[in-house]
Image (cartoon, grey):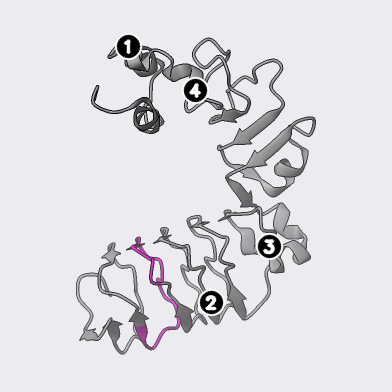
Amino acid sequence: MSKLDIYSFQIVSQYFYFESDFINSVLINKKYRLLLDRFRYNPISVSDIKIFPFIEMQHLYTKNDMIIPDIHRLVVWYPVSLQESKTLFSEYDVVFKNVSLSKKDAKNNDVTLNIPQCVNTLGFEFDSHLQVETFVVPDHIKNLTEQLFSYNQQLQEVTLSKCIRRLPNQCFYNCVHLSKIDIPECLCVIEDEVFYKCGFVSFTFPKASISLENHFLDTHQIGGVVFSRFDIHPNSHFN
């Protein structure tokens, strides 16, 4: 570790979890003695500037994090709703990194159909007021929650965001009319019962390197599944 220059070691230290790790890091070698002075933000939760005396922007990782006096710029990493992002910390220059469109937010149909760029997660029952046959998940959406579209009786076709890597449990559970979905190349995991009792007659994956959980596709209508260029027939992942 002592072979690293201070710049490289600072990059490594950004992945430390505990305050003690940072304190011990300056003791490894005298060339690291000013390491903590180099930080302009806090890579872990802090309540004062003892560890990082020259931070200019505070990152909040949990709702319990206390804001340091005389700090004017914030980055919020814990989940907040769209409505909360408009009201929280209004007196600060703030950036929210984990904004979810909730059921309450979705009462505004314009917001539901024209999802703001600041939103990166579609929250539970987001679609409770969504009455459409075709829905496109915008590319700035990175996360979907469990049971997101479950029991939607209108939905027939979905295009997923290019940033979606995981489809959570029962995401499209019992969407009986859902017959087409465009799956992005980056998708890595399809969890339990994601397409349980959907209306698919065929299903295509853009690549073969994907993890499938139990009964991800449970339908009596399915005629075949295509992984890249290889056809496979129902097995333990299907009912």
Closer to the eye: label 2 or 4: 4
Task: Look at the image and tell me whether residue 154 can be seen.
Answer: no
Residue located beneath label 1 in the image = 30
Q: Distance from label 1 to label 3 (Cα)?
A: 51 Å
Residue 22 falls in image quadrant: top left
SS class of the residue under badge 2? strand
Amino acid type for the residue under numbered disc 3:
Ile
Image coordinates of residue 136 in percent, x first then y, are 59, 74
The residue positioned 42% from the left and 75% from the top of the image is 197
Q: Are marks 2 and 4 in contact (CB under 8 Å)?
A: no
Q: Nearer the viewer, mark 1 or mark 3?
A: 1
Placement of the C terminus among the 4 image quadrants: bottom left
What is the span of residues highlighted in magenta in the rendered image? 185-203
Instruction: Name the amino acid, label 2.
Output: Val
Q: Please tell me which residue lies in front, 138 or 177.
A: 138
Give the residue pinned by disc 4. 38
Q: Amino acid at mark 4?
A: Arg
Report, in whole angstroms, how far the alpha carbon at label 2 lies from the one at label 4. Answer: 47 Å
Give the percent coordinates (x, y) of residue 115.
Answer: 68, 62
Magenta-drawn stretch, dominant element (helix, strand or loop): loop
* Quarter of the view holding residue 190: bottom left
Task: Determine which residue is flagged by label 2.
Answer: 158
